[in-house]
Image: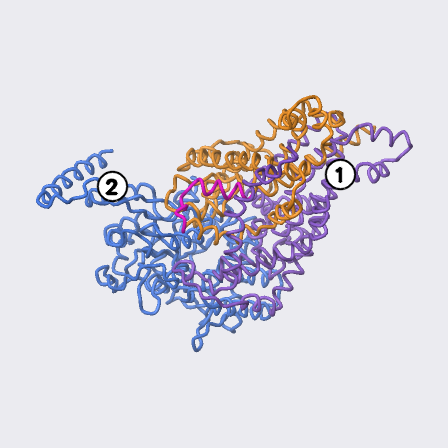
Chain colours: A orange, B purple, C blue
Amino acid sequence: MRRLALNAVALAVLVVTIFPVYWMYLTAFKPTRDIQAATPTFWPSSPTLDHFVTAVNAPGFWTFWRNSLLVTVAAVLLALVVAMAAAFAATRMRWRGRGAFVVMVFAAQMAPWEALLVPVFIIARDTGLLDSLAMLTGVYFMITLPFTIVTLRGFLAAIPPELEEAAQVDGCSRLVAFRRVTFPLLAPGLMATSLFGFITAWNEFAFVNVLIIKDQDKRTLPVWLSSFRDVFGTDWGATMAAAGLFALPVLLLFLFLQRRVGTGMTAGAVKG
Amino acid sequence: MRGRPFWPYLLIAPTVAGGAFLLLYPVAKAAVISLQHFRMGELIKGGAAFIGFGNYAELLSGDEFWAVLLRTVWWTAVNVVLIVVLSTAVALLLVRLRRGMRLALMSALALAWATPIIAATTVFQWLFQSELGVVNWLLVTLGLDSFRGYTWFADGDATFAVLVVLVVWQSVPFAALTLYAGLTTIPAELYESARIDGGTGWQIFWQVTLPMLRTLFALIVSLEVIWVAKCFPQIWVLSQGGPGDATTTLPVYAFKIARVLHRYDLGSAVAMLTVLILAVALISNLRRMVGS
Amino acid sequence: MKHRLTAAVAALALAAAACGSDAGTGAAPESSGPAKLTVWIMDGSVTQDLLKTFETGYEAARPEVDLDIQIQAWDGIGERVTAALASTDAPDVIEVGNTQVAQYAASGGVTDLTAKVADLRGEDWLPGLAQPGNIDGKQYGIPWYAANRVVVYHKDLFAKADVQPPKTRDEWLEITKKLNQGGNQGIYLTGQTWYALAGFIWDEGGDLAVQEGGRWKGALDTPQALAGMEFYQRLQALGKGPKDADEANPPQHEVFAQGEVAQIIAVPGIAARVLEVEPDLKDKIGNFPIPGKTPDKPGSVFTGGSDLIVPVASQHQEEAYEVVKALAGEEFQTDLAKAMSFVPNRTSLAGVLSGDEGTAAMATGAANGRATPNTPNWAAVEATSVIKQYMTAVLTGGDPATEARKTSESITATLNSGS
């Protein structure tokens, strides 16, 4: 009975959560004529792949795809490595200025990136870094870094240092102890943070819009996603198909991480 | 290793270096711009003149800024409370579900989270369309005939409500999944002993779960405060801050000023004040950070 | 392919000739290759085929130039153009909307082409395109093409209701009422089609904003402007256009394609979009000019369109101007007007449109074409959607006079915000 009620609630949450996403994919499969039908249809009566064809055949699709993957993965990995080091120093070591450092990192979360568009553009222009994927990666790295440090620090703080110390007593070096004992326990933290970083960088439009000007081959997927609009309005079928494809990598990443994290991560492990 | 003090500094060096060039430098530049006469002409040709605190004076002396600020506080409070309550409920639900259902719900959450903001916003715009929208259709089908052709985006409060639904829908997945990850790190033994002691569900939540996840909750609350307060594209796409000023929050206001009117100087001043206000609002959290 | 081969051969021949003539000095920088010119064209302005033909032909005639025509998406274009103007190596030619060109021209980032007006035969440019590109007597924006709205109608529904295209506004209301029956919509007019409202206001003798002693003033609260809004309201009620949306969302051609809408207000080029959605409507789409108050004069319309600009930061000023000259020249203008159903940039070229009903209706209306208030800040008024919100407020029961006064004040503030 209790199980049934629980599942019913879960189902309701699932429906509410998934409905807008379902509507997005549904629209992508509907013929244009059905998209604005007077009575809504909840199932495509005559599904079509036309919108996906339009989306994939849009100019630069594959180049944008490659750039996005390159920039996003580079920014996320860089942020993870840099953040791991900083979070380790902030939780496991005592040093002058630690408190100030943590406050600064936390404050960096509040960075008004929308308002930094103009200053970042000016800096890029004056240092010859316009039309550069490296600059773009740097910006995305910086947008995600504070969050990554703060979250990793939170997860790291939840793992008792005694575990590492015990391993060190057993003769491991500090680095080895961290890698063997703490790192696996950090898995959920890594999952949450890397997903967050991935989604943030993957979706970013404002910066790529002004940092990549003349060299169109360096633009990223959000540019493609917003390209199905002209003076008559937006081709919603194509946009929804594009958005559906656009969301796929994030979902795949989630499912992949979910499997990796699902095994070997149990509550008992924390207790050691 | 503990005896050598340079290690921690070496470990934070990349963070500091990156932050200095890509964050502090632009912020400093924005601060300078906020003290200048800096419009489209100055952006293109350079040669901005220094005008002191004129931009700040212009902002703080007008009524509009304060009205926008108040609205932003209200907007943030409503959203954050809803997000935290709902995501906690979903996280607690997740740990109680069997594997299959749990994975399905988590995938749904991930899917919602992964949906590009522009696509999600557009879908919501459709759902709430007056003539062809699913929401009105559903309400009328359920017998609420007053919603036939109801214009959600003509009324300030209705538009505000639609935006809250959208932002909560987009924000719950991250918070719920993070809280769920936190819940799984609570040793099962703690729950067992609490249950043996005769604790009810609520008591266990308040006495075991909440204290264990206190830092995580503090973190999520402060992150959501920051994100919701800074939330922009959804509002701009759906309502451009309207009707009237009903949904003009600080970031929308800053955007209108900076990138529509091309008053980058005044926009930078708004951004500086926003950061200041956020910092003050979260100061207790900052204190706790230093303390720990 | 064939074109490209011809171009390559021509290029080789010319390069050889150039080398020959330079042989004496021996200083020719042979390795530098042709100058690469970047041209930004908005998505949907020109068909891919036409652009390709232009590019091939242009490069064949001028082997010293390598054209890189980049199609620009609409989202974020304002920031992108601003960034381009502010960069050190900007695109060489940019297409900008005629309501946007003034703000760029005023920024100092656009090359002054006043000296070239005669060379471009600017004596009979469409004023709706030439004026916004002109700041303080200097011509920065070069008119490219225009398009104005007409009434696009469903011939079958007109036949079924036994009505003819109207000649006056009163007739228009009358027939629309007849058409608005039996599940059909007389007109699908969304609540925020503001350029239609602008036309009605101009017909009444009002304006969106007026200049008084160097200061701009929002004018929606004048009796004339309120009369225009009242007509809009009466017309809008004769269909199911959503009161809180504009014509692009949902795209009105998709709604028209459902076959239950008798009329929409749009540029004639929209017919192609309708047919993409519903090919069965072929030969069933007609056009007539927006009716005026009297039969002898069609309604005023907003002239939409584009100008071409050369950024100061372009590294190839001379070559860039040559491209502008070709794009604004008679040959390309003729091709463009025919392919896209646009009005060419010069009134003397209007003849190329004869023979097509849609463009003929447009040309009739164009005689009464008007532009938005000529100030760099007008773009900001558009971007903040205040006029759209005003329309929604009135259509959903707000007091027109109060709402108009509020909106006019907001427009006044925006237009007088310095730059």
Q: Position of residue B249 (x, y in %)?
A: 61, 57
As for residue A137 lying within the magenta part, the answer is yes
Tell me the SS state at disc 2.
helix
Q: Is residue C115 above or below residue A83?
A: below
Chain identifier of the residue bearing label 2 in the image: C
As for residue A33 lying within the magenta part, the answer is no
**In this view of the protein, which residue sits in the foreground, A262 or A116?**
A116
**In this view of the protein, which residue sits in the foreground, C38 or B116?**
C38
Give the residue number, with chain letter if any, for mark 1: B213
Q: Main secondary structure of the magenta part?
A: helix
Of tags 2 and 1, the one toward the viewer is 1
Quadrant housing residue A227:
top left
Q: Is residue C55 above or below residue C82?
A: above
Q: Is residue C317 above or below residue A58?
A: below
Looking at the rendered image, the quarter that the N terminus of chain B falls into is top right
Could you tell me how far apart the alpha carbons at marks 2 and 1 are, in whole angstroms? 66 Å
Q: Magenta segment, which residues? A: A126-143
Q: Position of residue C23 (x, y in %)?
A: 9, 42
